[in-house]
């Protein structure tokens, strides 16, 4: 079966000063997502994870453009679509949940208008059945007394409720893919846990695929099937969550896992030295080599390619490449 | 037992709510902090954890004397801070410093890093210009920065480096206690680990105490020796960090632990049994403030306020179950 979403060799570049300076925010990203699957896209700020998502939904800022690559969603290449055509995709088959629920809700419209909008435009639901649909959606995100609350405005809701309203809007068009960009960063821990449980239940009921964009490995461990680790515009490692947490291959993935505090353990954290690179002035070779504990002279000279560790498990690292090669030599000898 | 650096007894802070009209009649009180007691030992990190609106930042402000407590006492080195004035008060302010969450708004963009760090010295000491510069270079090195960055402006630094500058500023007067109000929450994972290791290292070399305020249990538990859990202005549980994580007694602490994100996909926690949201501090529930959300609430909980008491060794809980 063909995957629901297949991104291949996506490159999104920002140009400034009339094209004299190019920042490669996304530089050759490839991944695939099946129906009903959850992918965690993880990385630190400025690694290109949000730009990747904005490229998928066609909401890039004016300075950015997709330089090359394909984004195939349900058999259609989204990079070839016009903005007009993309409007029929966004909200209908791909929905987005953003970080700040206050900024993504319009304070001047009632909850009913905002939750009903995608159903009105994309599913042609009108009148009483639209009201019914909005109530069902609000009930599914566990808003108490939905018939009354749908007449309220965003300011009358708490932060957790607003975020659930945004979830209801995302579901209103009946999407096959939801992109959630740091959806729980502003929520309290118990509210965050409630929200994540809710998303899991909704996914179970509707079979929607979810891309979680986050810097929080805990969310990935709790929610995702597969994960892709981004660093400086590239996916440096991707595999199933289980594989990556058990035996990470890329030094950056290892370091990220090592810097995660574990409950009830006082083991010293691994602090990655230095800081994420400036995308406008990337180091030569592997972009991670100045901070890498296992760097070799080769790493500073040449850029590594993806080394394959198993079906759907790749790591972009010279050490990993060596490991694979040795294993191959041993097998063939 | 050694004398604690700081003790707070029965600390309360009520904020008035007035009508918006001309008369500003006070109509209600927000009970932001209600009878909080704790002590911080020298060289110790006390974690203070709770959800937004639980009063943890107000507690910090009270300790920093940014707000005047409605009732209660803050005891530093055996003296009640609230009755201090003049030189003694300056000595307290010099010994207790703060690092805020957002390193972008807590450093003046118009001042050079060296001047930012030297400002407390200008206020609190009679050091000469050269001596101040020397001291600035010393603390910059302590927090892992090059001494020559003193000439630069804050915008030339990343978030993690700025947080180091804020820590350097907090350390420059011979500080005994630093209040870290969500000091690592805004940082990236790898940078957060750097800053936390740096804080632990500083504590080991200088013997400074921390009040570490946070909302992420794993982070707070990692750095703290003891943890105090707050809910709606009250302290519900206080215990040693590992004890609290392995044997949480208060149902709210148990819920926080269940809500904490796993560090491995196999690390399955029980599903969260907590429903609803934190009630308003304007009209807190009667009796135990947690009883409206508590999965183990009894009729008694709605009527009687539980008193915090020691139920296991060095493990205090405010709950009728024990």
Image: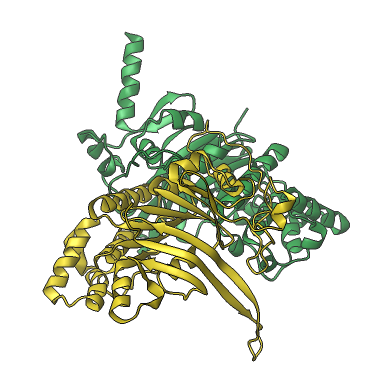
Chain colours: A green, B yellow
Depth check: give the residue in front, B225 or A11: B225
Depth check: give the residue in front, B52 or B232: B232
**Farthest residue toward the top?**
A333
| Quarter containing the C terminus of chain B | top right
**Farthest residue toward the front?**
B1
Q: Is residue A24 above or below residue B258?
A: below
Depth check: give the residue in front, A233 or A69: A233
**Farthest residue toward the right?**
A128
Can residue B50 be seen? Answer: yes
Residue A132 image-quadrant placement: bottom right
**Farthest residue toward the left?**
B130
Depth check: give the residue in front, A94 or B12: B12
B7 displayed left or right of A198: left
Q: Is residue B210 above or below residue A266?
A: below
A282 displayed left or right of A165: left
Q: So how many labels did they put on this image?
A: 0
Residue B244: percent from left, percent from top: 49, 44
A254 displayed left or right of A127: left
A330 displayed left or right of B135: right
Residue A137: percent from left, percent from top: 76, 51
Residue A81: percent from left, percent from top: 59, 49
Q: Is residue A284 above or below residue B183?
A: above
Residue A320: percent from left, percent from top: 34, 28
Can residue A215 be seen? Answer: no
Residue at image point 13% right, 76% down: B128
Residue A116 image-quadrant placement: bottom right
């Amino acid at each position: 079966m063909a995957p629901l979403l297949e991104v291949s060799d996506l490159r999104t570049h920002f140009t400034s000063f009339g094209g004299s300076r190019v920042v490669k925010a996304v530089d050759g990203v490839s991944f695939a997502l099946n129906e009903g699957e959850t992918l965690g896209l993880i990385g630190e700020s400025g690694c290109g994870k949000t730009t990747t998502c904005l490229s998928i939904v066609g909401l890039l800022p004016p300075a950015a453009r997709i330089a090359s690559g394909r984004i195939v969603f349900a058999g259609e290449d989204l990079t070839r679509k016009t903005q007009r055509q993309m409007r029929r995709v966004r909200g209908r088959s791909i929905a987005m949940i953003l970080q700040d629920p206050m900024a993504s809700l319009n304070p001047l419209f009632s909850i009913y208008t905002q939750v009903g909008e995608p159903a009105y435009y994309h599913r042609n639901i009108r009148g009483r059945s639209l009201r019914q649909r909005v109530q069902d959606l609000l009930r599914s995100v566990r808003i108490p007394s939905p018939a009354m609350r749908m007449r309220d405005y965003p300011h009358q809701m708490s932060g957790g409720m607003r975020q659930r309203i945004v979830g209801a809007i995302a579901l209103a068009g009946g999407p096959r893919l939801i992109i959630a960009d740091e959806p729980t960063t502003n929520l309290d821990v118990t509210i965050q846990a409630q929200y994540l449980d809710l998303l899991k239940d909704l996914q179970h009921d509707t079979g929607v695929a979810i891309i979680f964009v986050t810097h929080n490995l805990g969310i990935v461990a709790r929610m995702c099937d597969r994960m892709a680790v981004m660093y400086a515009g590239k996916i440096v490692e991707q595999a199933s969550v289980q594989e990556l947490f058990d035996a990470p291959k890329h030094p950056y993935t290892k370091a990220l896992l090592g810097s995660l505090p574990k409950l009830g353990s006082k083991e010293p954290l691994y602090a990655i030295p230095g800081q994420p690179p400036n995308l406008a002035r990337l180091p030569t070779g592997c972009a991670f080599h100045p901070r890498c504990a296992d760097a070799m002279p080769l790493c500073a000279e040449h850029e590594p390619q993806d080394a394959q560790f198993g079906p759907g498990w790749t790591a972009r690292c010279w050490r990993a490449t060596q490991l694979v090669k040795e294993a191959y030599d041993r097998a063939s000898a | 037992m050694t004398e604690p650096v700081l003790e707070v007894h029965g600390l309360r802070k009520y904020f008035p709510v007035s009508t918006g009209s001309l008369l500003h009649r006070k109509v209600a009180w927000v009970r932001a902090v209600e009878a909080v007691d704790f002590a911080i030992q020298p060289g110790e990190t006390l974690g203070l954890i709770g959800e937004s609106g639980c009063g943890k930042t107000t507690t910090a402000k009270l300790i920093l004397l940014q707000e005047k407590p409605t009732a209660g006492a803050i005891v530093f080195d055996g003296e009640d801070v609230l009755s201090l004035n003049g030189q003694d008060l300056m000595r307290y302010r010099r010994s207790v410093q703060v690092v805020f969450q957002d390193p972008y708004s807590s450093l003046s963009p118009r001042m050079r890093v060296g001047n930012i760090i030297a400002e407390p010295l200008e206020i609190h000491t009679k050091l000469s210009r050269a001596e101040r510069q020397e001291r600035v270079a010393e603390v910059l090195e302590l927090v892992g920065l090059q001494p020559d960055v003193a000439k630069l402006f804050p915008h030339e630094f990343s978030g993690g480096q700025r947080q180091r500058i804020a820590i350097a500023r907090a350390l420059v007067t011979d500080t005994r206690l630093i209040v870290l109000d969500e000091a690592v929450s805004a940082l990236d994972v790898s940078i957060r680990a750097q800053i936390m290791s740096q804080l632990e290292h500083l504590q080991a070399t200088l013997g400074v105490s921390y009040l570490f305020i946070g909302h992420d249990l794993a982070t707070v538990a990692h750095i703290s020796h003891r943890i105090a859990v707050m809910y709606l202005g009250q302290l519900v549980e206080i215990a040693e960090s590992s004890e609290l994580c392995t044997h949480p007694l208060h149902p709210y602490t148990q819920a926080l632990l269940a809500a904490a994100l796993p560090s491995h996909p196999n690390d399955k926690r029980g599903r969260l049994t907590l429903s609803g949201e934190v009630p308003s501090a304007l009209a807190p529930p009667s009796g135990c403030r947690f009883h409206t959300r508590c999965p183990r609430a009894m009729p008694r909980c709605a009527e009687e306020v539980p008193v915090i008491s020691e139920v296991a060794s060095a493990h205090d809980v405010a709950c009728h179950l024990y």
